[in-house]
Amino acid sequence: MAILADEATRIIIQGITGREASAATKDSLDYGANVVAGVTPGKGGSEVYGVPVYDTVRAAVAAHPADASVVSVPAPFAKDAALEAVENGVRLVVILTERIPRRDVVEVIDRARELRARVIGPNSLGLISPDRTRVGMVGGRAADVRKAYKRGPVGILSRSGGMTTELANLLTLHGIGQSTCVSIGGDPIVGSTYTDLMPLFESDPETRVVA
């Protein structure tokens, strides 16, 4: 199995019309991730690579129930975006945005815990369950992701998104696959630490070791 997300995970992308989020949407779709909707206030009714865009998370999940959200918005708006996700029933929120004020991050984490949601990041590139799904932009283009990652028994945790891919690529070159790889985020305060995620790997029958 995979932890946090698999091929059945339905993903929305907040800030989908932005340059980086738009590119990540295409690459995730190309990889096979189930991106069902996007959110950008004022852009409702448009599409990004065939993904419908809504003005609010509430409207997006009403039309397309979602398990996970990727937050890729400017730092001043990241708190509101993340809170909007968890308060509308999204249980996994991956925050790509960096340099969010610490007070905002703490508020998001506290609210997520109240609602039994999990936060990855901020300043994360996301997570990947090789050959199943990707939530975020870890690994870059779909073709590069397929080269660097392969399915197998090793879980990876790293604060750095680049190091997450580097570790996976080294393992893949030696014929060793990965179960789930998580870029937990490089900011001083993150929603899920090594300690938080290790029990998930320990309960996963596919994962035999964590790097």
Image (cartoon, grey):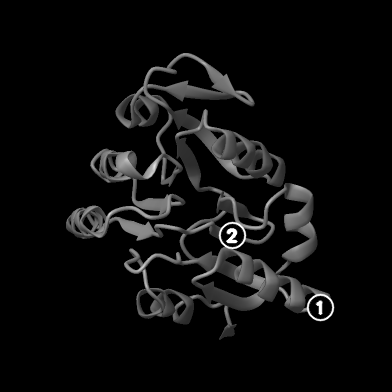
For the view shown, which residue lies furthest in the bottom direction? 209
Q: Is residue 136 left or right of residue 116?
A: right
Q: Dot 1 lies on which element?
A: loop
**Foreground of the two, 72 or 194:** 72
Please state, as top left, top right, bottom left or bottom right, where the C terminus lies in the image.
Answer: bottom right
Q: Which residue is mark 2?
A: 128
Quadrant assignment, res 147: bottom right
Q: Which residue is mark 1?
A: 175
Could you say where residue 87 lies in the image, as x and y percent from the top left? 23, 42
Pointer 2 with pointer 1, Cβ within 8 A: no
Count residues near mark 1 (Cα–Cα under 10 Å), then give few for <14, some for 14-19, many for 20+: few
Of the image marks 2 and 1, the number of the one nearer the N terminus: 2
**Foreground of the two, 141 or 154:** 141
Q: Residue at x 57, y 68 (%)?
A: 181
Q: Residue at x 41, y 22 (%)?
A: 54
Could you say where residue 184 lies in the image, as x and y percent from the top left? 45, 67
**Foreground of the two, 107 or 134:** 107
| Residue 1 appears anywhere in the view | no
| Residue 180 appears anywhere in the view | yes
Vertical placement of residue 148 versus 10, above or below = below
Q: Residue at x 46, y 38 (%)?
A: 12
What amino acid is found at the position of numbered circle 1 in the picture? Gly
For the view shown, which residue lies furthest in the top direction? 45
Could you say where residue 145 lies in the image, as x and y percent from the top left? 72, 56
Q: Residue at x 23, y 52 (%)?
A: 104
Q: Dot 2 lies on which element?
A: strand
